[in-house]
Image (spheres, coloured by chain):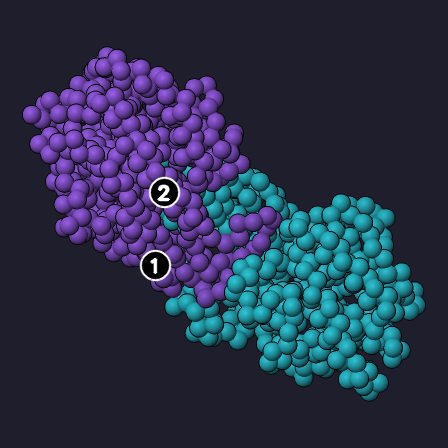
Chain colours: A cyan, B purple
C-alpha cells in the first residue's frame, strides 16, 4: 500500500471509528414501522458521509419503502467501474435484556465494536466509505466507483427490487463488477471469499380452528387444537433423516462434484470448537453431510418464530382459535424460489386435518441461491487484494446465509459479483451483542483499496 | 317457593344486578401480579356483601397468596350445614381487541351480562350471596350455611390448598355437604347437574438449543432448531388415533360400563349445532368415542400456549436459543395426577434429541378427577330443587373442565359435593365476550333456595 494511504488512515483512524459509532447510534430497524424516522435518518447520514468523502452526486432515491442512497465518483470514463452495494438498515435488537450494553449505544470492548448493525452491515458499509475518502484524499482512486446503499435488506429489499425493474435505473448502475461486503471471513488468520450464498423463502403461517378461544377443559379432546395441529404439521415437514419432505423439493438441488466436496472438506473446521461456541453437545442436520456441507451446499428449513394461545404469566386453560409461525427455507443452486413456494403451499395446506384452515403469506419468495464465478477478473482481483493485505491466500467458501437482492443483481445487471465480507461468524449478527472487530474494519479498508488497484490493472 | 321470597327477589332484582355489576367491574385477574390490588379489592367486596346479606363472622383469611373470604350463618346447631364454595378471581381477559365491550365494563345485552367473570365465577358466587340475603330477609333459611370464597381458583388454589393442610382449618369448614356453582347447565330448557369433573395437570416447558439466538442462514440445517424440535416433541405426544402416547398414561383410566355410555348418549347433543357454534367443519378426538365421551370420560392433552423466536412484525431470520410451551392434560377417574406428571416428564425429556435440554415446570400437578356420588342426599336434594324451579328433572352430566380444589375438598373434608352450576357452555368463559344470562342468575337464586329446603328435610 502507498505510504500516503497508510499514513492517511493512521492519522484519521479515531475519527473513522467515531463516525461509525454515530452511524451505529441510529436504530435503523427496517422490519418495524416504529423505527421509520430512524431508518430515514440513517439514509441521510450515509448520503452526507459519501458527500464528505468526496463522492459526486450523492443523493437519496425514493422508493415505495425506504430510500436508496446513490453516489458515484468518475475518474475517467475509460476506466472500469465498480458498484459497491450494502445496506444501512439493521435487524431488530430484541431480546434487549440479553445485551450486555444497549444495542444502539455502541462501545468498544476488547477491540470489538458492540452494537446492532456493527457487523451487519453498517461497519462493512462504512469501511467502503472511508476507503473512498482515503483514496480521494491521497489521489489513489484507480477506477470509477458507484455506491448503492439500501435500507430494506433486512426486510426484503422491496424498494430496490422495484427500482431494478426500470431499465433507466439499471443503466444508472452499469458497472464492470459488483462489490459487496456483507458476509464473513473464516478468521483473522485465514481470510476467505464467499463464492456461494443460499437463497431464501420466508413465509408466515396462520392456522385456524374454532371461531374463538375455547376453554380447554370444556372442549379439550373433542376439538382440534390449532397449536397441537400446527406442531404436527411442522413436524411432518422433515423426516427422521432431517430431510425436507415437501414433494419435489430436492428435484433441482445440484449434486456437488466429489472434487468440490473435497475442497469444502479442506476448509479449517473443528466440530468440537463449533459445538462449544454454541454451547451444544451435538449438531443436527441432514444425514450424509458434514456441517459445512449442511450450511453451504444443502437446503434447510427453520421455524423462525411461533406463537399462539396464552403466552403470559400463569396457567390460562385456553384452546386457542389460532396459532402462527414464521418459517424460512434456505435454497441452494438450482432450486427455484417461486416453484418451491408453490410446492410448499400445496403440501402444507394438505397436511391440515379437516376443520382446520391454513393461510400462508409470502414475506420473501423470490431469492435464489447465488454462485460467484470463480474465474472472473473481479474474483481474481479480490484474491490478490487479500494476498497483499493479509499475506495469505483466501479460501473460497460457501455461506449458508442469503442476500436476497444479490440474485436479482446477477440477473438484472449481468455482472460479476464479489462477496468480500470482513465479518466473522462469531460476530453474533441477528443476535444480542452483535459486534465487529476494529481490526476487521481497518483491514477491510486496506483490502478494498487493494481490490480497486488489482481490478483496474487486471481489467485493462 | 314462598310468596314472600318471590316478592323479595322481585322487589330487589335491579339492585341485585347492580351489585353484581360492581363486582364485575373489579379486574380480579389472579394469574398476573399486576392485578394484585384489584384481586384484594374483590375479596373485600365479597366480605362486605356477605356481611350486608346478614352472614355472621364475615372475614378475610390471609394465605400466602390471595385471601380466602369466610362467612357463616348458624341457625341451629342441630340442623345440617352446607358449605358454599366459589371464587372471586377471574381469568385474564386478553385478547382485549376481540371483546365487543370492555371486559371490565359490564353491560347487559339481550338479557345477558357481558364481562370477564360474569359466568366464571362472579355471577354464580353472587347469586349465592343474594340467596342468603333473601332467605335471611324473609326468615326462610332452613339450615346453617358457611361460605368459603377463594381468590386463586384460576391460578392453582395454592393458598386454599395450604389452608386445608391444617386440621384446625378443616374443622372450621366442617359441614354436611359442599355446594359449588362453577359449572354449566345443558340449557335453560334442560337443566343438569354435573356428576363428574376431569382433573388437570398444567406444565410449562422450555426447550433450549444453542446458547444464543443464531442467524438461521449461517446455522440453519446444521444446528437443531428448538422450535422445530419442540414441535416434533409435541407432535409425538399423540398418535394418529388421537391417543396420548405417554407410556402408562391410560393404565388407570376407568373403563366406563356400557350402561353409563348409554346414559351419556341420551344427553341431548346435535353435532352439527356444536360444529356450527364453533365454526368448524369437523370435530377431532380420540377414535372410538363420541364428542361427549371425549370431553366427559376420556383424558385430553392440549397445548395452551406456545412461543419462541421472532413473533413481531416482519421476517427476522433467527434460529432461536429457546422455545416454550404451556401444556395441560385433563385426567379422568382413577388417573393419579402426580403419577402422570412423573410419566410425562420421563417420556417428554427422552423425546429430546442430543444437544437439546428440556425443563419442565409444574404449574398445577395435583388435581385428580372428581366423581359425585349420585346416591347422596345432597344430590337428591339438588335434583328436587331443579324439578321444583325448572319443572324438569335435571340430567346428570360429566364435564370436561376441572375445579382443581374440588378433588382436595373431597379428600380432606370427606363430604358429598354438589356441582350445581348455572352457566351455559356458550357463556364463553375463558374467552372474549364472556357472559351470563340474567335468567340464569335469578333462576340460580331460586334453585339454591329450594336446595337448602330439600337438603334440610331429606337430611333429617
Any part of residue B270 in sight: no
Residue B98 point in image, percent of width and height = 51, 34
Mark 2: which secondary structure?
helix
Please tell me whether residue B88 is drawn above or below residue A429 in the rendered image. above
Residue B44 badge: 2
Say which quadrant the C terminus of chain B sits in.
top left
Say which quadrant the N terminus of chain B sits in.
top left
Callout in the foreground (1, 2): 2
Residue A290 point in image, percent of width and height = 46, 65
Please state if B341 lies on the left or on the right of A412 as rendered: left
Q: Tell me which corner region of the image, top left, top right, bottom left or bottom right, holds residue A39.
A: bottom right
Residue A245 point in image, percent of width and height = 45, 46
Q: Chain of mark 1?
A: B
Please state if B448 lies on the left or on the right of B459 as rendered: right
Mark 1: which secondary structure?
strand
Q: Answer whether labels 1 and 2 touch (C-beta < 8 Å).
A: no
Badge 2: how crowded within 10 Å, few (<14), some, or many (20+)? Answer: some
Q: Tell me which corner region of the image, top left, top right, bottom left or bottom right, holds residue A321.
A: top left
Please state if A386 lies on the left or on the right of B377 as rendered: right
Q: CA distance from mark 1 to mark 2?
A: 38 Å
Please state if B309 lies on the left or on the right of B258 as rendered: right
Q: Which residue is mark 1?
A: B359
Residue pictured at 32% horizontal, 52% vertical: B65
Residue B178 point in image, percent of width and height = 18, 34
- The one nearer the camera, B26 or A238, is B26
The residue lying furthest to the left in this view is: B460
Please tell me whether residue B114 is drawn above or below residue A45 in the rendered image. above
- The one nearer the camera, A213 or B235, is A213
Any part of residue A107 in sight: yes
Q: Tell me which corner region of the image, top left, top right, bottom left or bottom right, holds residue B176.
A: top left
Q: Earlier in the sequence, mark 1 or mark 2?
A: 2
Amino acid at each position: 500500500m502507498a505510504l500516503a494511504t497508510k499514513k492517511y488512515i493512521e492519522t484519521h483512524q479515531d475519527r473513522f471509528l467515531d463516525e461509525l459509532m454515530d452511524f451505529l447510534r441510529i436504530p435503523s430497524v427496517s422490519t418495524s414501522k416504529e423505527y421509520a424516522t430512524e431508518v430515514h435518518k440513517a439514509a441521510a447520514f450515509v448520503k452526507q458521509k459519501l458527500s464528505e468523502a468526496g463522492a459526486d452526486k450523492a443523493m437519496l432515491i425514493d422508493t415505495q419503502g425506504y430510500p436508496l442512497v446513490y453516489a458515484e465518483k468518475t475518474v475517467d470514463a475509460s476506466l472500469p467501474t465498480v458498484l459497491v452495494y450494502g445496506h444501512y438498515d439493521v435487524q431488530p435488537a430484541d431480546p434487549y435484556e440479553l445485551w450486555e450494553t444497549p444495542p444502539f449505544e455502541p462501545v468498544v470492548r476488547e477491540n470489538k465494536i458492540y452494537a446492532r448493525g456493527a457487523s451487519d452491515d453498517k461497519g462493512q458499509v462504512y469501511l467502503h466509505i472511508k476507503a473512498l475518502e482515503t483514496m480521494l484524499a491521497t489521489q489513489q482512486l484507480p477506477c470509477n466507483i458507484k455506491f448503492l446503499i439500501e435500507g430494506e435488506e433486512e426486510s426484503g429489499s422491496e424498494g430496490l427490487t422495484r427500482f431494478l425493474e426500470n431499465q433507466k435505473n439499471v443503466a444508472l448502475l452499469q458497472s464492470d463488477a459488483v462489490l459487496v461486503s456483507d458476509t464473513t471471513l473464516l478468521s483473522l488468520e485465514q481470510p476467505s471469499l464467499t463464492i456461494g450464498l443460499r437463497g431464501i423463502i420466508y413465509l408466515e403461517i396462520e392456522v385456524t380452528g374454532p371461531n374463538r378461544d375455547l376453554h380447554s377443559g370444556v372442549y379439550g379432546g373433542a376439538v382440534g387444537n390449532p397449536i397441537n395441529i400446527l406442531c404436527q404439521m411442522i413436524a411432518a415437514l422433515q423426516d427422521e433423516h432431517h430431510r425436507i419432505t415437501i414433494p419435489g423439493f430436492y428435484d433441482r438441488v445440484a449434486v456437488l462434484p466429489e472434487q468440490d466436496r473435497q475442497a469444502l472438506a479442506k476448509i479449517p473446521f473443528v466440530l468440537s470448537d463449533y459445538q462449544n461456541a454454541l454451547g451444544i453437545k451435538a449438531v443436527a442436520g441432514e444425514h450424509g453431510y458434514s456441517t459445512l456441507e449442511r450450511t453451504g451446499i444443502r437446503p434447510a428449513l427453520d421455524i423462525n418464530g411461533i406463537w399462539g394461545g396464552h403466552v403470559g404469566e400463569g396457567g390460562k386453560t385456553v384452546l386457542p382459535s389460532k396459532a402462527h409461525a414464521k418459517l424460512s427455507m434456505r435454497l441452494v443452486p438450482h432450486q427455484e424460489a417461486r416453484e418451491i413456494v408453490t410446492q410448499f403451499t400445496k403440501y402444507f395446506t394438505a397436511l391440515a386435518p379437516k376443520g382446520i384452515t391454513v393461510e400462508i403469506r409470502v414475506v420473501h419468495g423470490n431469492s435464489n441461491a447465488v454462485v460467484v464465478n470463480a474465474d472472473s477478473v473481479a474474483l481474481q482481483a479480490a484474491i490478490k487484494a487479500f494476498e497483499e493485505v493479509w499475506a495469505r491466500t483466501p479460501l473460497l467458501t460457501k455461506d449458508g446465509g442469503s442476500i436476497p437482492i444479490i440474485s436479482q443483481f446477477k440477473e438484472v445487471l449481468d455482472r460479476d459479483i464479489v462477496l468480500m465480507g470482513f465479518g466473522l461468524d462469531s460476530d453474533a449478527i441477528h443476535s444480542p451483542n452483535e459486534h465487529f472487530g476494529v481490526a476487521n474494519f481497518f483491514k477491510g479498508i486496506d483490502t478494498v483499496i487493494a481490490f480497486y488497484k488489482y481490478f483496474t490493472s487486471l481489467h485493462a
